[in-house]
Image (tube, grey):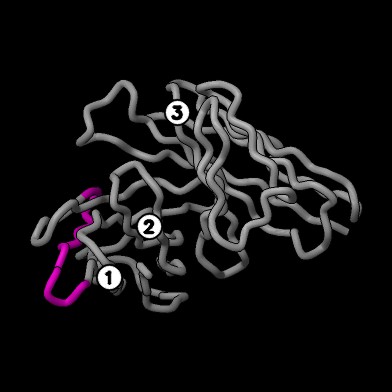
Amino acid sequence: GDSVTQMEGPVTLSEEAFLTINCTYTATGYPSLFWYVQYPGEGLQLLLKATKADDKGSNKGFEATYRKETTSFHLEKGSVQVSDSAVYFCALSYNQGGKLIFGQGTELSVKP
Amino acid sequence: GAVVSQHPSWVICKSGTSVKIECRSLDFQATTMFWYRQFPKQSLMLMATSNEGSKATYEQGVEKDKFLINHASLTLSTLTVTSAHPEDSSFYICSARDYISLAPSTDTQYFGPGTRLTVL
């Protein structure tokens, strides 16, 4: 069946460091891919998405490229801030607003 | 952006009692809502898909009679955990699909803040 695998956390970085959170997927079809972020005490928010191979999603300085050949959707940011501390979830879906399959989440902690 | 609320945000109950959790879309109509369960340090697992005016669709392994879902209006879905036991303790999260008013390319799912259930 379809699944999503993320790198384990927690990930601890200093402010302004480069961030990469790895995400790979297994899919029987051609899904859309998403990154969601969950700040402490809040609900999940859509961070970015890509709907087809080679698409790049971007938002708030974060980027991820849909790589069909490596079945990956790694999240990157060039310079993290303390306010980026949160849990990040990679997910896939065959309909943009439909049923989501999530990875296990990666906790990011950014220190001043 | 669209807002989804959940009530209560946390609840403690005795074993054997039933607990109802509400999920509301505050500024949009949602024909579809989803219920997820999240264990500590783990991912969100989809429990069921709730469609307004029809029966919910449950994922494999989820007990329909234990987790009753009702989607009576376009802005409200409820999850009732019946005869709760300690193993039902978890973080329950709902989401609502905003699709009616937007173009398919902006079809998006919005999440509630979650409900922490503790069964003693």
Give amino acid for label 2.
Asp
Q: Locate residue A58 relative to residue A36 in the image: left or right.
A: left
Question: x, y percentage for residue B8?
Answer: 71, 37
Contact check, label 1 and label 2, Cβ < 8 Å: yes
**Quadrant assignment, res A37:** bottom left
Q: Is residue B111 above or below residue A84?
A: above
Q: Is B55 covered by the magenta stretch?
A: no
The CA distance from mark 3 to mark 2 is 32 Å
Give amino acid for label 3.
Thr
Label placed on residue A89: none
Residue identified by numbered label 1: A19
The CA distance from mark 3 to mark 1 is 37 Å
Quadrant of the image containing the C terminus of chain B: bottom right
Q: Locate residue A22 relative to residue B31 in the image: left or right.
A: left
Label placed on residue B31: 3
- Residue at image position (80%, 47%) is B82
Q: Chain of mark 3?
A: B
Label placed on residue A84: 2
